[in-house]
Every structure is written in structure tokens, then in C-alpha cells.
Amino acid sequence: MFPISLVTSITLTGILLYAGVICFVLIFVLNQRNGLNNYKVSELDFAFLIYIAAFFICTLVNSGFDAGLNSLFGKCQDYFVYFWVVSFFSKNPKQSGLIQKAIFIAAFITILYGLFQFFHLDLLHRQGDLDRLSGFHKNSYTYAGQLIVFFFFLLNGFDKRKDKLIALLLPLLCMFCILNSSERAVIFGVIAGLILYFILHRISLKDILLFFSILLLPVLVTVIFHRKVIKRIKKAVLPGATSVPNIRFKLWGTALAIWKRHFLFGSGRFPTVSYQIGNTFSIKYLTHAHNVYFQILATDGLIGLIAFLNLFYTVIKVVSYNLKTNKYAYALFSVLLAFFIEGIFEYFWGDSEVRYLLLYFIGYVVGNALELNTKKR
């Protein structure tokens, strides 16, 4: 239910999140023996603790007790989304099918509504820009960020299925939505993740050729009916002599300048940066660095960035324990690589819809890894 609400309504997600926290506390306090008897504290739990403590301390130093408390609650929510899935899995590993179904239904709804928007059937009026698909979020960055998780989740194990054409249908429709979100950072990240996915899975050349031959269809449809995507990608890869420098360079420079003055704890906030979109358009204001690493350096300093990177390093380390038997391990690695690349150009961690879905998926894959590791012992 959680990922389904996440792609349809952030308000409903918030309700579920707070309700889940309350239920968890009640189970833990009133019925601890039956609630979490199979769960074992892992090194990833400690990595989350470091992450929570680091951001709490940095915010406390920069912005005072109230802001520090808000940061503490927010980072604890991040941990809870992950822990919610892991603890649910640890109670009964057979329930993993329910988690898979929830993610699958969320992916199906997300892709279907994106296709509706492409054909101008935006029934709920959720498309902020007619040239860019945005799902239910009115924001193509949020939509495309969630599609990263869904794409590799749906693609996982297609080479082991008998009817490969049917198995590839949803992943390729998902790729079509990614392309038509016109979110270049996500497109580049997914391509890199796809290469890693094929390398890790050691998929046969025949299956790789099948995938890319079918992939040509959504690419060709996008090229024919949505040329602005190609122009945006071309502008990023091959900027012309008259091209205006990307505003991101200015934002990155601002972030680094702030970090140099606030090396350890950051400054607590990123300043508002304005720039003119065009000669006939109004001025746009940006409040983040369009780079997750520079953003964290500027707001939470070196301590925050180390805690953030340590969290994902620990995720990779824990999942690596059971690569061959963990069904979605390689898919998660591809997802993380795609987000790593997207993070160079976008501040995806500041988008709760993307962050929560990623943590939910991490929780499922890590829960499987911890369960398998426990069985070996």
C-alpha cells in the first residue's frame, strides 16, 4: 500500500507513514516478543544511526534546537521507511510477495498515467508541462526519479523468463515514460545503470540484442513525436557555440564557496539564486544546488556528506553478502548507480516521493539479504 500511495498522493503517504510509526511503537513497546522477534540489528542500522545523528548535529549547530529537532524527526522517518519493510520481511519471509505486488501495482499505475499524459488524457490535471510527463506529481523530476526504481524492478530477471517479449513490455513502456519526462540526468543515469545491469547479470548476447532491438521502438516514437527531448539531450552533450552556460555551474560554484566557509557543519541552508530563463520570460528562483553532493556539503558540511555516502556504501556492502541468491541485488546496484549519476545534476534526496520509494526498495532488497545471511549461519 505504501508505494501505491506514494505515486498517487504524498498526503496519503504522510498519513500512512505517521500511522506506521505509531503502530510500530505500540508493537515494540506492548508486544515486543511477537513484534520483532526475528529481527537482528545490522551494520546498516548503525549506518542509519550515524546518518540521523550527523544531520541532527549539523542542523542543531547551524539553525538551533527547533530546526535540529525537525531534522531529527525527518531523518528518523527515512530510517522508518526502510525499517518498516525489513521488519515486515523478517516476521515472515514468505510475505515478500506482498511487497513485490505493492511495488508492481505502483509501477503499473505510474506508467499507465504517464502514457495517458502522453496522449493528452491527463484526467486529474497533474501535468505541469505539456512537453514533459510528470505522472501524479506535477513535476517531471519527481516522476522520472521514481521511474528509475520501477524500471530496474520490472526489468529484473527478464532473461530467465520464457516469454521474453511479454516480460519486456512494461520495462520498455517505463523507458518510454522516462524518455518523455525529458529529464536528462535520469536518462543518463538509467543508461549507465542498464550497462551495469547487463554486466553483473552476465546476460547472453542474444538477450541483450533482443532488448535493444525492442528498445528502438520507444526511442523512435519519442524521436518522431517528441523532438524536444532529443534537442535537450543534444544541448547537454554537444552545446553549441552560442549556448548559454548551464545555471548548474553557477549553483555548484555557490555551493562550494559556502562549504569552504563552513567546512565541517555546513551553513544550514542554500541561498536563493535567481536567473533569467529567456528574454521574454520571468526570473526563476532556485533554492538548491542541482547536485545532491554539493547541496549536502553546503548545508551540512563534510560531516553530513560522509554520513550520507557511508549509508549507501553500507547498503551495497550488506546486499553484497548474498549476490547470487538475492533476487533484486543487481537491480538495486543499477538503481543506486543511476541515482549516483542523477545526483550529479539533481538534488533527488530533497524530494520525499523519490527518497521514500528508494528507501522502500532498499528495505526490501536488504531484508532479503539479511534473511539469507541468517539462514547461512
Image (tube, rainbow, N blue to C red):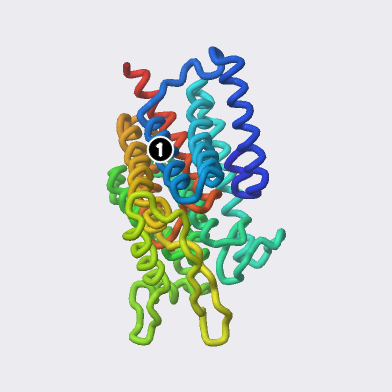
Q: Is residue 79 above or below residue 196?
A: above
x 38%, y 47%: residue: 304
Q: Is residue 63 left or right of residue 114?
A: left
The quadrant in which residue 44 appears is: top left
In the displayed image of the protein, which residue is found farthest to the top?
33
Q: Is residue 122 left or right of residue 304?
A: right
Quarter of the image with the N terminus in it? top right
x 51%, y 37%: residue: 76
The residue type indicated by label 1 comes to Tyr
Q: Which residue is mark 1?
A: 328
On the question of residue 338 being in view, the answer is no
Q: Nearer the viewer, residue 345 or 234?
A: 345
Q: Nearer the viewer, residue 49 or 15?
A: 49
Image position, residue 170 (x, y; %): 51, 50
Q: Is residue 122 left or right of residue 231?
A: right
Question: Which structural element holds mark 1?
Answer: loop
Q: Is residue 43 above or below residue 120?
A: above
Image position, residue 11 (x, y; %): 67, 47
x 54%, y 12%: residue: 33
Q: Is residue 289 above or below residue 202?
A: below
Q: Is residue 243 above or below residue 287?
A: below
Quarter of the image with the C terminus in it? top left
Q: Nearer the viewer, residue 205 or 185?
A: 185
Within-10-Å neighbours for mark 1: few <14, some 14–19, many 20+: many
Image position, residue 207 (x, y; %): 34, 49
Image position, residue 297 (x, y; %): 37, 54
